[in-house]
Amino acid sequence: MSWENNVRKVVPYTPGEQPKLDNIIKLNTNENPYPPAPGVQEILDNFDIAMMRKYPDPNAQILVDAIAKTYAVKPSQVFVGVGSDDVIAMAFMTFFNGDKPILFPDVTYSFYDVWADVYRIPYNQLPLTEDFRIDPKDYARENGGIIFPNPNAPTGVLESLETVEEILKANPDSIVIVDEAYIDFGGVSALPLLEKYENLLVVQTYSKSRSMAGMRIGFAIGSEKLIKFMNDVKFSVNSYTMNQITLLCGAKALEDDRYFRETTGKIAATREDAKKRLTELGFTFPDSYSNFIFAKHKTADAGVIFEKLKERRIFVRYWNKPRISQYLRITVGTPEEMEQLYTALTDILKEVGA
């Protein structure tokens, strides 16, 4: 049909399964196993439903101000959106408009190439090293912009601030986006580098460390000039991107730093224990600084393990893709959930003779 000639066709991003089953152990989408800060429940319990008849604040000022205070920046340096996916998509639309290809790793968050295709942005995927690290020298070339996660997804590998800065130094004429969705589980943020690099944009999310994936809050922090450009695009597309309840809950969640550090600390401790337990079971993995482990068994096939875990109602993430087809990404759950995982893996490895 001729009208199809005008349709924008892309291969969409495939999210992790959201099974509609009872009594499952869900370790496939890097959700936080603990509830949000208690103050979030207070907001929900006391929310005036009459507020829903009015549009929310298009500037999201209560949330922007709370983020600025928490991260010691100016409100004019903060951009907020409906999850970090929305924020990054807006950044692609705002900053990646040249003829030169943008650059990102070959093993990374699989939404980047989707956005590039949607917005018709040329791109090159640069191979990580054998141990899944970024070689900053690879990024010292002509480009239309750069994006990479730190820690990386799905590998969990953390690059040093020195590596991040080496990429920034080599690219003064490009916007460099550091996607820090998992930084709160053990890494050091690139935020201090904002004082030196006007072309740096740091993106974070409430979905992982703040236990609010279901509420969809993401934010970017950068120079005032970058944030103004992003807001200009946002207000040209949709002024009212965040709802009333989300703005209030997002601001409230930042007030309880003790709870935040407690829950992220528990996840990091469970992750370190998981490294030992998985090693005992014959798995190898790059050292993870995130809330997941990217694990490969020495002899057992990852696809087989994945399916046999599903039969036991334990869900992990598996990609049948080049370089990573023998790896499983395992979200760090509660200690109790992880014990059930280790028991299941022990049984499965016996079944397959591994």
Image (cartoon, rainbow, N blue to C red):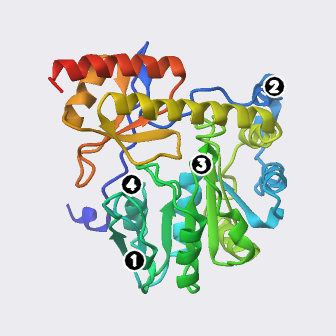
- Spatial separation of the CA atoms under disc 4 and disc 1: 20 Å
Asked which secondary structure carries label 4, the reply is loop
Judged left or right of residue 341, residue 299 is left
Q: Callout 2, which amino acid?
A: Glu
Residue carrying label 1: 138
Mark toward the viewer: 1 or 3: 1
- Density class for disc 2 (Cα within 10 Å; few <14, some 14-19, many ≥20) is few
Residue with the mark numbered 2: 42
Report the amino acid beneath label 3.
Answer: Gly
Q: State the residue at coordinates (35%, 70%).
A: 126
**Which residue occupies 41% across, 84% down?**
100
Residue at point 53% right, 44% down? 290
Decide which of tag 1 and tag 3 comes sooner along the chain: 3
271 or 44, which is in the foreground? 271
Secondary structure beneath dot 3 equals helix
Distance between the alpha carbons at the discs numbered 2 and 3: 22 Å
**Residue type marked 4:** Ser
Q: Residues within 10 Å of mark 1 (few under 14, many from 20)?
A: few
Q: Is residue 253 above or below residue 223?
A: above
Instruction: Look at label 1 and name its amino acid.
Output: Asp
Q: What residue is shown with label 3?
A: 83
Does 245 sit above or below residue 309? below
- Where residue 333 appears, as percent x and y from the top left, is 51, 27
